[in-house]
Amino acid sequence: MRDGFAYAGGGADVDPKPVRAKSAFWSSGHTPTLIAAFLYFDLAFMVWVLLGPLAPDIAATLQLSAAEKGLMVATPTLAGAILRVVNGLLVDRIGPKRSGAISQMIVIGGLLSAWTLGVNSFGGTLVLGVILGFAGASFAIALPLASRWYPPEHQGKAMGLAGMGNSGTVFAALFAPTLAKMFGWNAVLGLACTPLSIVFVAYMLLAKDAPGAPAPKRLVAYFEPLKRADAWWFMAFYAVTFGGFVGLAASLTIYFTDRFGLSTITAGYCTAGCVFAGSLVRPMGGALADAIGGVKTLGAVFIVAAFALAGVSGAATVSSALALFVLAMLALGAGNGAVFQLVPQRFSSEIGVMTGLVGMAGGVGGFYLASSLGIAKQLTGSYQAGFLIFAGLALVAFAGLALVKTRWRNSWAAAEGVRI
């Protein structure tokens, strides 16, 4: 795909004539690359939030306060947010496949070092969190790796399927607490390197950069989208949808153990159920946005998420909290897919850097939610204020969407002939 068009062929004899006719999804792109992008994203997300399920055990060993626990699980999110911009630049300069290979080697090497040397202080957890941020920054690599192969009418599905790799957070929640109980939490860091190494080999065999990628630009040119208001709107919307998803994924094990006294293993199962719901619907959100428009999908997402998070703030039982978290994650997961159905329509020739910028904003939103929950708990003895404020941010996002939707439909969406 080049400049928003699909091109016939895909090899050296590419027909330069753009083709706008719709084609079947599976024959319109490169399935092995889509699989590689999903696997890379999936395992990267597994280790990105690894400190969340391990947090109760780590906190007990290192005697961490509630605020320190919140900052510990939020640090990988913030590091991932910043590194997404770096990866977005790298993707447009050396290609997504090589960028992904570099990032995976850094994460595997960092986890092996943490396992062999040990993590013995709060500062050590923060250093580990920064290394895990490279895994979170996989977002800015995996999505353009897949997206560049697909035409505009299939962007929602392609980005949704590749982005479904955020289901890796389920594996962290399911297995990390059990493995920590069996072998100790530090051993989990070393054990994670085995599946990461297997996926790295599969990635190198399956992934292929799409033909016709945009030529590298001067460094300053990568920040040109920030001169347009639409880039900031997309960043704000994703800070709520993805920020809510990853912030909850990193924090729920702590919440369930602190709020209801659940064991780390049971809390991990509860967290896994919530995260699975949000991961499952991401491609559905992209497909729904393809069908009815990303704006309509996002509008519903923000209302449902605000309602669910406000309800969680007053939940008195495990079952009611769990039901509301699942509802919130379903909405936020669909919203993640909807945002990235819209971004390629508006910034088709700048998808690499826009993926990095929008992904960075999502990471910042996740850092805010995870850290604010810890601060709220320490200052007030309850998580209620943290949930209520984020519910308010979802309503602010809904108001912002209502403000820009008419201009979007009458300007760039009409020019491209796409449904938003």
Image (spheres, rainbow, N blue to C red):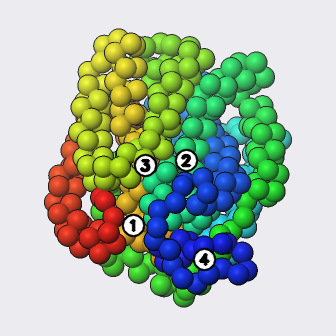
Q: Which residue is mark 2?
A: 161
Answer with mark 2 or mark 3, whichever residue precedes in sequence: 2
Q: Which residue is mark 3?
A: 286
- Amino acid type at circle 1 is Gln
Q: Nearer the viewer, residue 214 or 81?
A: 214
| Quadrant that contains the N terminus | bottom right
Answer with mark 4 or mark 1, whichever residue precedes in sequence: 4
Q: Are the two marked residues, 2 and 3, in contact with CB atoms closer than 8 angstroms?
A: yes
| Relative height, residue 338 to residue 62 (above, below) | below
**Can residue 122 be seen in this snapshot?**
no
Q: Nearer the viewer, residue 41 or 393?
A: 41
Q: Quadrant of residue 248?
A: top left
Distance Cα–Cα, label 3 vs label 4: 23 Å
Q: Which residue is mark 4?
A: 213
Q: Which residue is mark 1?
A: 345
Q: Are the two marked residues, 2 and 1, in contact with CB atoms closer than 8 angstroms?
A: no
Distance Cα–Cα, label 4 vs label 1: 16 Å
- Amino acid type at circle 2 is Leu
Dot 3: what SS?
helix
Q: Nearer the viewer, residue 303 or 236?
A: 303
Give the side of residue 12 with respect to residue 310, left or right.
right
